[in-house]
Image (tube, grey):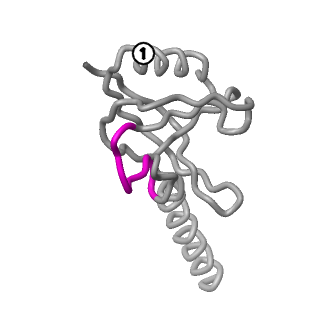
Amino acid sequence: MLKASSLMMALAGGILILITLIPLANAVENPGPFKIRSIKVAQPQNFHFRVIAEALPDTWLCNNGPKNPAWAFINESDPGSKGMMSALLTAYASKKTVSLVTEGVDIGGSRFCKIVEFEISG
């Protein structure tokens, strides 16, 4: 009986560690405010709507994401994508400052920055 309870405690401890570490694997990042230099639109599932940051040399919008230029994306199938794209186009046209929240996504051995949410300010 002692072995079974020790095994159960070890299993519970392992599950607790996994539950604690899983959110860190896909942690969101806030790279800081910037103005949008340009917007690129591609195929619906090929980094469909890309926001390219202005004047951020040698930086990225998520850890180890694209830089020179730094950019982040929204795919057409992402929840709320149409509203997000519309708001970002408006921010670009109005030369507003954008603060993104991004999530690093690993695809084909490279890391890309997916836009999770954002704020637009003066």
Q: Amino acid at mark 1?
A: Ala
Which span of residues is magenta-colored? 54-63
- Taking the spot 62% from the left edge, 79% from the top edge, the residue there is 7
Direction bottom: furthest residue:
3
Q: What residue did someone put label 1 on?
A: 93
Q: Is residue 19 above or below residue 41?
A: below
Asked if residue 78 can be seen in this view, the reply is: no
For disc 1, the neighbor class at 10 Å (few under 14, some 14 to 19, many from 20) is: few
Instruction: Give the quarter of the figure containing the N terminus.
Output: bottom right
Residue 61 on the magenta span: yes
Which residue occupies the foreground of this view, 47 or 55?
A: 55
Find numbered disc 1 in the image and state the secondary structure of the residue it sits on. Answer: helix
Q: Quadrant of the C terminus?
A: top left
Residue 46 located left or right of residue 111: right
Q: In screen coordinates, is 58 left or right of 80?
A: left
Query: Residue 32: x and y, percent?
Result: 31, 41
Q: Position of residue 85 (x, y in %)?
A: 55, 21
Residue 34 % position (x, y): 32, 35
Q: Nearer the viewer, residue 16 or 35?
A: 35
Can residue 4 be seen here? yes
Q: Quadrant of residue 22?
A: bottom right
Q: Does residue 25 belong to the magenta stretch?
A: no
The percent position of residue 31, horizontal first and vertical second, equals 36, 45
Magenta: main secondary structure = loop
- Left or right: where does residue 90 sit relative to residue 112? left
